[in-house]
Image (cartoon, rainbow, N blue to C red):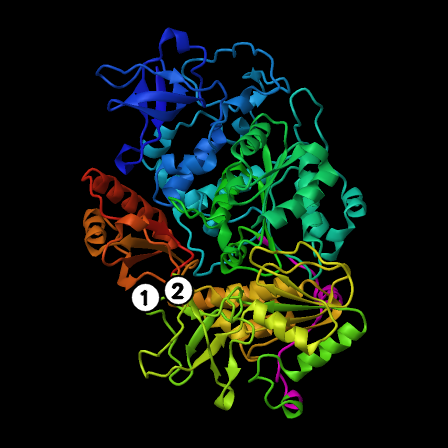
């Protein structure tokens, strides 16, 4: 007998099924392999979860069709993580497995291997064994199981989902916002409401931490690795000495413990090297590490540092790799050949053996949010995995999100910060125009113009001394937004109602705007950003005026203006499809869009952060948090003692946090504000998107807990993806929001999971999407 999880779309079929194993497949049909089974007359892909002596099913069992591959790709740890993630995000295990395990590439599985021996047969009633593969590709099923000590007993997906109270406990225990560490007194905050199940889990974690020994068990066949002395770590990794308790954190990693921290890097810090050092200390202790970064440029940087310290034991995983290359590297991790994985959001599911560290850089980046069902966030999955495995967790960045601040205040993680005296030596001088009365006397219009005189003065001085100047612009293009010059209503296309703009590639881009009265400009040939049709004869639909004015100046137009202001100085652009990885030292102006700022040797002398209102004025819950994160990423490229000028109101808390370089204070302020109005992470949100009929159908089937608030319906927030393909767009899509305290978060997810299962039996084709804590709330 074999218990199989078929990869089926309907939510009500997210359960295990028993199949009869024919004699010819008895040797290959081992827990964790891919299989093909017949379900309702169709051949379906699936994963074999466990072998059974007998089945509880009283009817006739269907035979297993075939074993796709003898590679045991689903490990027990990943199965448990998949189950917890599906419960947390009200999704199905099949959807999470599609995110966790890449598609098979048959040729890659057989590359470099001789004809393998038949795998040793395990007992028929066994849970999924963690595959330990030798360098020649032969599976060793008798190798030591690192997870067995942490999780004694066999745990199956069926028991995790069906046992009384098991899902409740798993979901509650896995919520890191309510877990107390062993060595920190818990801090009671509204953002961290604890349940009895969570307290029981915290007691178990505390017991394990108190009984931990500093001697680590290494790979099978090797001797135990002793903890690295603190003096040796301090001498070998002096960069961590600038942070309070930095070397203590590394010592805990080397001793095999699982410390958790929110690390705020100093300005100008070689953060990629620091993350590689964390991975090196972890690998030296005989364990593996996962490092997640937002994009390919950061991945290449961190991977180069890891390769310098660890050699070929570090691999990179990203969606940009081809199917064969990605599967080859993923297999090297599964087989134990690679100990460190550097990747984007999908790397959080990497089957690293004996995981000891999960670190992520810049967790506030929106690329960490998975756009596919069940829409998990890599940070939340990483915390779930760290809690389940006891691995260390590090959320690193120049700025800090409210979610990381919540787990620090709950006691689940610690601060890893530098002393203010060290910070003052590393940071540049940051100012805002008109931040003092004296500055306003010198330049009364400093707050009203795009680039004040003080910014031009500092830039000229830096260029004269041979320094580089960085100019950060929120928008790319030439003039990406236009409005009527008379009534200021945004200019729209007559054909599709899209926004009009002057694109960089348009023939009229250069000099298309000619000065008019009071600085108003007229556009000759604006084009629609949606359909691309040129609007040669624009007329405002509200007032009838033909005059246009620029609402936002893009990076291309900014570079053109700065080229006129600084003749003879090279002006480089970075953004869009032409992102510069680095620029040489010397006098130059680098105009960059957000997130595309290239580093320069020695750091920039001056940085100008333009159009702060465009970042702070967005109608989004995380607008201020994102603005500070993007500003700090650019300001960190400026050398110590350099100048950073941010074009924004100096009285705003976000600007004050940048001027003082105090991301922890800003994260605490954001958390307090959200707690007061009951927004994530203080509470759990569930966004239900669809038509009014589909939402009503789901809510009619849902048995919601009594403390759940129903908000809406409201329109989808701008930029949010609609829950359907472009070919079957309904007349109207709306959003309903369910809000619950963190103590009732698991119950809310269970209610939505059950309601989706019931709705899937109705075979309704109306579009519907359920997201837990979406990043786009509105």
**How would you rate the neighbour count of disc 1 (Cα within 10 Å): few for under 14, some for 14-19, many for 20 or more?**
few
Is residue 423 inside the magenta stretch? Answer: yes
Image coords of residue 574 (percent x, y): 62, 60
Tell me the SS state at disc 2. loop
Vertical order, 656 against 180 (above or below): below
Question: Residue 564 or 708: which is nearer the viewer?
Answer: 564
Q: Using the image, determine if residue 263 lies above or below residue 259.
A: below
- Region in magenta: 414-439
Mark 2 vs 1, N-terminal side: 1
Q: Determine whether, in the image, residue 72 is placed left or right of residue 42.
A: right
* Residue in the image at 66% along x and 87% along y: 439
Q: Is residue 252 visible?
A: no
Q: Position of residue 87 (x, y in %)?
A: 37, 41
Does the image show residue 684?
yes
Foreground of the two, 170 or 141: 141
Between residue 673 and residue 463, name the one nearer to us: 463
Percent of width and height locating residue 513: 51, 78
Quadrant of the image occupied by residue 451: bottom right
For this view, does 258 lie left or right of residue 687?
Answer: right
Above or below for 402 versus 749: below
**For residue 79: magenta?**
no
Q: Is residue 51 above or below residue 340?
A: above
Q: Residue at x 73, y 32 (%)?
A: 226
Which circle marks residue 533 in the picture?
Answer: 2
Q: Which mark is residue 495?
A: 1
């Amino acid at each position: 007998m074999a218990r199989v999880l078929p990869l089926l779309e309907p939510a009500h079929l997210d359960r295990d099924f028993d199949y009869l194993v024919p004699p010819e497949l008895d040797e290959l049909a081992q827990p964790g392999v891919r299989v093909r089974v017949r379900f309702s007359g169709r051949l379906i892909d699936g994963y074999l979860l466990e072998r059974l002596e007998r089945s509880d099913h009283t009817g006739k069992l269907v035979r297993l069709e075939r074993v796709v591959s003898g590679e045991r790709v689903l490990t027990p740890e990943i199965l448990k993580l998949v189950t917890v993630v599906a419960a947390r995000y009200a999704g199905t295990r099949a959807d999470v497995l599609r995110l966790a395990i890449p598609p098979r590439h048959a040729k890659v599985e057989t590359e470099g291997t001789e004809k393998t021996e038949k795998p040793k047969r395990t007992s028929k009633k066994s849970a999924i064994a963690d595959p330990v593969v030798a360098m020649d590709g032969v599976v060793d099923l008798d190798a030591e199981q690192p997870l067995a000590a942490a999780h004694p007993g066999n745990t199956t997906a069926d028991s995790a989902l069906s046992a009384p109270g098991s899902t409740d406990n798993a979901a509650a225990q896995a919520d890191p916002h309510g877990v107390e560490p062993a060595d920190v007194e818990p801090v009671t905050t509204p953002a961290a409401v604890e349940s009895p199940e969570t307290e029981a889990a915290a007691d178990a974690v505390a017991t394990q931490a108190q009984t931990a020994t500093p001697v680590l068990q290494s790979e099978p066949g090797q001797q135990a690795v002793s903890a690295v002395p603190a003096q040796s770590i301090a001498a070998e990794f002096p960069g961590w000495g600038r942070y309070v308790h930095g070397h203590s954190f590394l010592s805990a990693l080397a001793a095999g413990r699982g410390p958790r921290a929110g690390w705020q890097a100093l300005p100008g810090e070689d953060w990629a090297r620091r993350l590689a050092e964390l991975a090196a200390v972890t690998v030296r202790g005989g364990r593996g590490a996962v490092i997640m970064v937002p994009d390919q440029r950061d991945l290449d940087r961190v991977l180069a540092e890891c390769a310098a310290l660890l050699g070929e034991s570090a691999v990179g995983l990203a969606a940009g790799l081809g199917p064969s290359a990605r599967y080859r590297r993923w297999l090297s991790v599964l087989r134990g050949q690679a100990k460190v994985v550097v990747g984007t959001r999908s790397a959080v599911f990497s089957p690293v053996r004996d995981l000891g560290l999960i670190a992520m850089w810049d967790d506030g980046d929106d690329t960490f949010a998975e756009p596919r069902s069940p829409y998990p966030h890599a940070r939340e999955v990483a915390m779930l995995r760290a809690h389940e495995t006891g691995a260390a967790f590090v959320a690193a960045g120049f700025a800090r999100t409210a979610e990381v601040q919540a787990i620090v205040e709950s006691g689940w993680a610690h601060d890893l910060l530098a002393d203010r005296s060290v910070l003052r030596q590393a940071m540049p001088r940051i100012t805002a125009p008109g931040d003092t009365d004296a500055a306003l006397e010198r330049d009364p219009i400093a707050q009203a113009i795009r680039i004040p005189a003080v910014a031009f003065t500092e830039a000229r001085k830096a260029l004269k001394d041979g320094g580089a100047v960085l100019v950060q612009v929120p928008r790319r293009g030439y003039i990406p937004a236009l409005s009527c010059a008379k009534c200021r209503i945004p200019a729209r296309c007559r054909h599709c109602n899209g926004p009009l703009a002057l694109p960089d590639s348009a023939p009229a881009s250069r000099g298309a705007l000619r000065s008019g009265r009071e600085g108003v400009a007229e556009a000759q040939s604006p084009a629609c950003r949606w359909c691309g049709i040129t609007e040669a004869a624009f007329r405002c639909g509200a007032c009838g005026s033909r005059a246009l004015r620029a609402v936002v100046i893009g990076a291309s137009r900014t570079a053109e203006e700065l080229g006129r202001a600084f003749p003879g100085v090279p002006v480089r652009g970075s953004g869009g499809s032409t992102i510069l990885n680095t620029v040489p030292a010397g006098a130059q102006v680098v105009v960059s869009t957000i997130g595309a700022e290239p580093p320069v040797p020695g750091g920039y002398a001056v940085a100008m952060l333009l159009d702060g209102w465009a970042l702070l004025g967005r109608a989004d819950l995380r607008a201020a948090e994102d603005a500070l994160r993007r500003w700090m990423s650019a300001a960190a490229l400026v050398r110590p003692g350099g100048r950073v000028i941010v074009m924004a109101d100096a009285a705003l808390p976000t600007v004050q946090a940048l001027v003082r370089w105090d991301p922890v204070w800003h994260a605490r302020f954001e958390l307090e504000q959200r707690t007061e109005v009951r927004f994530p992470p203080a509470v759990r949100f569930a966004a239900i998107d669809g038509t009014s009929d589909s939402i009503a159908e789901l809510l009619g089937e849902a048995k919601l807990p009594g403390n759940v608030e129903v908000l809406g319906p409201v329109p989808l927030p701008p930029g949010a993806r609609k829950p359907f393909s472009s070919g079957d767009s309904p007349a109207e899509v709306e959003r309903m929001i369910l809000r619950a305290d963190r103590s009732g978060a698991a119950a809310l997810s269970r209610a939505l999971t059950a309601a989706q299962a019931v709705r899937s039996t109705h075979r309704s084709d109306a579009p519907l999407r359920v997201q837990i804590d979406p990043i786009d709330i509105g």
